[in-house]
Each structure stands twice: as C-alpha cells, then as structure tokens.
Image (cartoon, coloured by chain):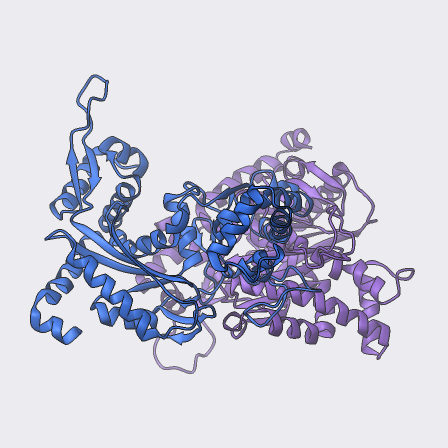
Chain colours: A blue, B purple
C-alpha cells in the first residue's frame, strides 16, 4: 500500500511537472500528513524536491511544491523506426535531456548492427548524465509486433525481422534490463499521458509510417489481448475487391490503402520522393492547390474514414488521434474521414468522439518508450531505485564493464 | 475486504455449483479457517449450505462441500428479443427454475405493451417461488444499444425503439431495481462464465439475429467504451462497393452481409420462411445437399470471415464464439471463415485463437441477463440480501402492493 502510494505520488509529479502538497492530497484522496510523509521518503531518495512556490497571491501559509528531480534519475529511450534510429536520455518528469539519431536505409538491417548503434548511443548518453544521476530504466519502441515478456520482435516486416531477440540483445549490450513495446502502442500511451489524449480512458491512436499501426486504450489500459499482439488496426481489411497488396501478404488492408505508398501513388508521384519526404511533398502540393495531390488526400481520407468509423463502432472511444505521417495527412483528408464517420458510425458513439492530430509529433514513440522505461520505477520507486543503483555501480567498475562489453 | 471475500466465495460456488472448502481455499488463495468463517456467514444468511461429500475414496477427514442455495435466493431474468419475450426465475447457482415465453410480431411494439407482458411474467414467476426465497435482483437483455446507468434503450432498430426508459419502467412495474444490458454483451459474459469461453480473458462473441451484435471481453472485462456503447461489430463495414443496405442507414455493414435477410436472400428463398425458421430451413437444405443453400452459407462465411479476421487482428483473442443464428450458420460456413482468417489475420494472432459455437444455445442472452441480475449480490452478498428482503417484504404487504401496481 505504501509502495503503491509512493509510486502514485511520483507518477503525479512526473506527469504534471510540479504539484503542491495540497493538489497532491486532492488528486490522490489522501490527507496532507500522509502526503508529507510520502514526499519526505521520495525526497530522501533524491527523486523529488520541495520548494516554496512563488507569490501565490493568497493569504496563509502556502503549500510546498513538489517537483521531480530530473537530474538525479533518468531513463534511456530508444526508437527503432523504419527509416531511423533514435535514442534519448529523458529525465524524471519527462524532459528529453539529450538525444542521438541515425538515418538508415530502409533495407533489411541485422539485429547486431541495430543493437550496436543503439548501445553506442546509450553509452554516450549515459556518459553525458550528471554525476550521481541514476539510470532507472531502459525502454525501446519498435515498428513491429513485440512479445512483451522479453522484447522479442516477432514480426517486423518493414525492417525485415522475424523472431529476433531484440530486447535481450540490447539489454546484454547495455548491461541493463530493457522493456520493448510496439511503437503505436507506446504512442497511444504517450498521447494519453503527455499529449492530446490526457484524461481520456478510451482512445484510439493511429500511427502512420510506411504502414499503419495502432494503440488502443480501453478503460484506461492498453488493449493487449492474449499475447500482447492486439491493436493491429492497420490490417483491418477495408477494401475486399481491388485492394492494394499489403506487406502482410493480404490485400486491401487499411495500411495498404492509406500508408505512404498509397498516398504517393495516388498523387502520381511514385517515381519521385519516397518515405516521409514524399508524403510531405504531396501534402505541401495539396496546400498549393495541386489537384492531383488534393485528390490523393481525399482518396486516402475515404479509406481512413471507413477504418475510423469501424473503430468508433467497436470501441466507443472519447478520442481518435492521428499520429506519425497521418498527422501530416489528416488535415487534408479530414472532410472525407468525417463524411465516412457520419455515414458509417452509430450516432450514439460518434456524437461524443473527438478526432485530433497527435500533440507530440515525431517524438511520440520516443516519449512512449521513455514512459515504458519509467514504468517500473513508478510501480515501486524505492526498490527499483536501489536495484538500478546497484546495477549501475557494478557497471562503473572497470573489470565488470570489460566483461559486460 | 471481508465483503469482497464473501462475494468472491459466493461467486465461486454460484458458477461452479459445488466446491469443497479446500478447493475454495486453493482458488481464492485464502487459508481454510478464513474460508470456514466466510462460509459460516453466508450459510447463516441462507445463501449457501454445507454438507459432507460422498465417498471421496481418500483417507482422512473429507473437506465439507459448499453449495449455493438455489431455493432461497433467486433472480428474475428477462430477454427482449426481436421476435419473442422470455422471462425466467433463476436460482442462485444458475439453474433456470421456471420460465415464460411469448412470441410476438416483429413489427414495432410500444414500451408499455412489452413492459406489461414482462411484468406479468415476473409476478407469476415470483408467486411460483418457494416461500422464503428472496428475489435478489432483476436483469434484462435487450436487442439494442443500452445506457448502462438507467437501462434506457438508446437505439433498438429492430423493435423500433429510440430513447425508451425500459429499465425504469420495468423496475417501477415490478417494484424492484432492474439492470439492463445489450443482449450480445450479456451473451459474451454468459459464455465466459458458463459456456464455451470459461477461463478466457480475451474473447469475442458474435450474436446473430436479424442483425449481428457483439460482446467483446478484453482483459477479463466487457469492453464498454466511454458510454457503454462499444462492441458494435455488426456495423463494421466489410463491403464498401455493392454492400447491402443496413438498418443503421449505411450499406455493407457486417450485419447486412451476414444477417438473416442476407442468408435467406442469397439462398433464393426470400418469399418463403423468414426469421429464425428461414435460417434453419436454409441450413437444413444445405445439409441435404441443396446447392443454392450451400452456396449461400459459403457467401455468408466469406463476409463473416473478413469480419472475424479484422477482430482477431484488433483483439488478439483466445476465442471467437458464434451465437444466436450464427450458431446454426457457422458449421456450413466454417471453411470460408477459416480461409479468410488464414488470408487476413496476422499469423501471430491467429495461431492461438479458437473458433467455436456458443455452448448455451438459445438461452445465452437469458443466462446473461440472469448473471447481470446476480451481479450486485455477488459484489456485496449480505448488504444486497438485506436490502432485497426489505424491498420484497414491502411488496408482500397488500396496501403497498396496491400502490406499487
């Protein structure tokens, strides 16, 4: 109980940035003396600090403000995207303190290469941390289907991986346990915790890249299903007649009809720029009034709208969020999406739902990876801090480091 | 905590029928003296009884067997289907002790008529209960979208109701609070608790009637969404080109392509038997080798398979269950469903899923309504028993009864 309260308090300040003791008491439904005792423990551990607020403009003794100690506890967050590798050191409280990025070809890359680059980034990022700052977790987002238990990539078609022990390999290179999640799952959690979905217990996040991934939050929790492989909304069949071929081997999947290739082909630009640049070129051309580009966005919006209407019928969500390349695409296809939702979603479910673009932009999956990395600390702060101190102390000893590398 | 333990113990014997004290201790993770104390309280309240088991064939003192007292606590369960009204008295433990049924025309029926028939059934069923048996709850299944808070039918197209205060009206006629749920939601819970889905935390139940409803269990809980209107898998668009018109105003919805009318039309029998009889006639004809009937089942199976594959991708469920008229239809269309699942569902999710027909048959929604009715008792047994004793004692006094009616 005490452990849970410590974790809850730390989560509140981690997500809010700074909260007074009385705000914490309100949010947690605890009395102020309990809040004071919990804060004292977290403060002694170096995870939060307390300070007097600025002038509150009110009479009486002001309530002390509790802040997360971003320079004393951090995580490493990694993001394996189709076209790049990203790594960051993120402080408690969620600020990205430092980052590294490598563009890579879209062709297949082997596990060792990817892990090698990421582990190198990880070492650099940790060396840059303030003395005494503890690495309290490592999280990674990956553009494929992930086994939650051990971070194995079961299926990552766009990178070309099947059953690759990504989490274990990266963990052994770093000498630290690594949690891995599907990028769209983590994107959904990031938007719920720090983005446009704050306060929504039922939301759907669509993440566009070459394909389209999904993260679906049901009753406050990420929908996993039996094995953690749920939310594959990109492989919802929307076009059973003349559907475009999909990487999964089928045809007419949502991602085949609304992904990068579909948009660029529909705009008649398949010989030109590809990937994210290609998508942006179409969106910009549509903004300048290019008819083919506008028409392509409308076509994508029509298929996207069928998918979104189906999802609204199934999930009765408070919000649907468009992220990744769909963040660029949605404004130009919103009318068609809206039309399909109007036509195909039950009125009772569609009357409340909001359609929005991601607030976190290109960092959404990286932020999700950081939150995954913080999750163990936020479940049992003092235990995990102690464990991670031990692990990183080991790593500081030269002999051990040599062995681990 | 004690209240929760009492409820959990009662739920275990309610669902299992009879369990020894030592089985209860194992399942609940409590020691035997706690089990004994909990059982004593429930036994004193008349909700369970204890007896020596038959010859166990083992040495040593046998563990007493705890049984639900089906004749001392019962619920009323109602089921408003498109073509009939059903009511039952169901004893603690789940046995249907008595029932009433009225066939009705499919045309619009007004709230007062339906509530009048059901309330009459309810009075008869309660009069038939053993003296001293307490009615501990009332539940109703309805073939439409239901607001959980007050049992209002928001949208029931096949009965023709929009925003009808069904739960409140039936409750005031019975003088007892009534919980109302969507028939397919309740069917999902019934199959999970008492049917083929026992032990599955992630399952999808498709309920075929004129339309197709759905109940989806995610992480052990019914998927509701923001307002409780989720699971509308029947309105997933599967045929965007030449889709059949749907009652919802759209075209190409799953229920339009696989419901009763679609099957009967596809078999070229639209002038003949309609409704459930019409479906059975097609299935029987296919069984006798009628080519048009076989072809109709295959056609239905193809669309159904697209829907099921989409659901497997989204939910990574352990089981998909076909109920209502789909229970009759599925065996003749299983090959096509399987083919679509093979082609369109991600291998990782489909490799574990089982496709099954409902084990509870035509009573699945009635059983679900009964379990909904028991839900309050199972949450706090002694409090709800006392409350319902007071309410029903009131009703036994002639003056009060006159007022309530």
Residue B336 placement: quadrant: bottom right
Percent across and percent down for residue B270 are 88, 60
All told, the count of numbered labels is 0
Left or right of B404 on screen, residue B314: left
Q: Is residue A141 visible?
A: no
Percent across and percent down for residue B37 are 35, 57
Percent across and percent down for residue B159 are 76, 45
Q: At x 19% / y 63%, what residue is drawn?
A: A123
Q: Is residue A261 visible?
A: yes
| Quadrant housing the C terminus of chain B | top right
Relative depth, front residue between A397 and B162: A397
Q: At x 55% / y 66%, what residue is drawn?
A: B197
Q: Is residue A145 above or below residue B386?
A: below
Left or right of A126 on screen, residue A324: right
Residue A104 placement: quadrant: bottom left
Q: At x 56% / y 68%, what residue is drawn?
A: B319
Q: Is residue B106 above or below residue A401?
A: above
Left or right of B193 on screen, residue B254: right
Residue A235 placement: quadrant: bottom right
Relative depth, front residue between A311 and B126: A311
Relative depth, front residue between A147 and B381: A147
Percent across and percent down for residue A129 are 16, 53
């Amino acid at each position: 109980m005490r452990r849970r309260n410590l974790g809850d308090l730390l989560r509140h300040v981690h997500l809010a940035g700074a909260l007074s003791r009385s705000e914490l008491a309100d949010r947690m439904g605890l009395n102020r003396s309990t809040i004071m005792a919990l804060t004292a423990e977290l403060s002694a551990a170096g995870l939060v600090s307390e300070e007097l607020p600025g002038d509150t403009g009110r009479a009486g003794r002001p309530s002390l403000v509790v802040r997360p100690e971003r320079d004393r506890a951090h995580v490493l967050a990694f993001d394996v995207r189709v076209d790049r590798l990203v790594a960051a050191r993120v402080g408690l409280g969620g600020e990205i303190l430092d980052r590294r990025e490598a563009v890579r070809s879209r062709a297949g890359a082997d596990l060792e290469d990817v892990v090698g680059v990421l582990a190198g980034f990880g070492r650099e990022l940790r060396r840059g941390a303030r003395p005494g700052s503890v690495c309290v977790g490592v999280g990674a987002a990956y553009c494929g289907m992930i086994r939650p238990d051990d971070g194995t990539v079961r299926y990552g078609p766009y990178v070309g991986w099947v059953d690759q022990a990504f989490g274990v390999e990266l963990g052994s290179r770093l000498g630290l346990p690594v949690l891995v999640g599907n990028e769209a799952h983590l994107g959904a959690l990031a938007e719920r915790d720090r983005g446009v979905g704050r306060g929504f217990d039922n939301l759907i996040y669509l993440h566009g890249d070459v394909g389209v991934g999904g993260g679906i939050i049901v009753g406050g929790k990420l929908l996993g299903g039996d094995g953690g492989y749920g939310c594959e909304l990109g492989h919802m069949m929307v076009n059973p007649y003349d559907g475009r071929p999909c990487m999964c081997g089928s045809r007419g999947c949502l991602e085949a009809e609304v992904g990068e290739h579909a948009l660029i082909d529909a705009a008649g630009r398949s010989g030109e720029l590809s990937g994210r640049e290609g998508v942006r070129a179409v969106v910009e051309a549509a903004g300048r009034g290019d008819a083919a580009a506008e028409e392509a966005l409308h076509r994508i919006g029509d298929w996207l709208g069928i998918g979104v209407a189906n999802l609204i019928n199934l999930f009765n969500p408070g919000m649907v969020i468009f992220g990744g390349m769909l963040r660029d695409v949605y404004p130009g296809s919103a009318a068609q999406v809206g039309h399909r939702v109007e036509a195909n979603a039950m009125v009772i479910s569609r009357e409340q739902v909001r359609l929005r673009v991601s607030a976190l932009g290109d960092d959404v999956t990286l932020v999700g990876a950081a939150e995954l990395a913080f999750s163990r600390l936020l479940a049992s702060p003092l235990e995990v801090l102690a464990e991670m101190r031990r692990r990183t102390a080991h790593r500081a000893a030269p002999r051990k480091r040599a062995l681990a590398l």
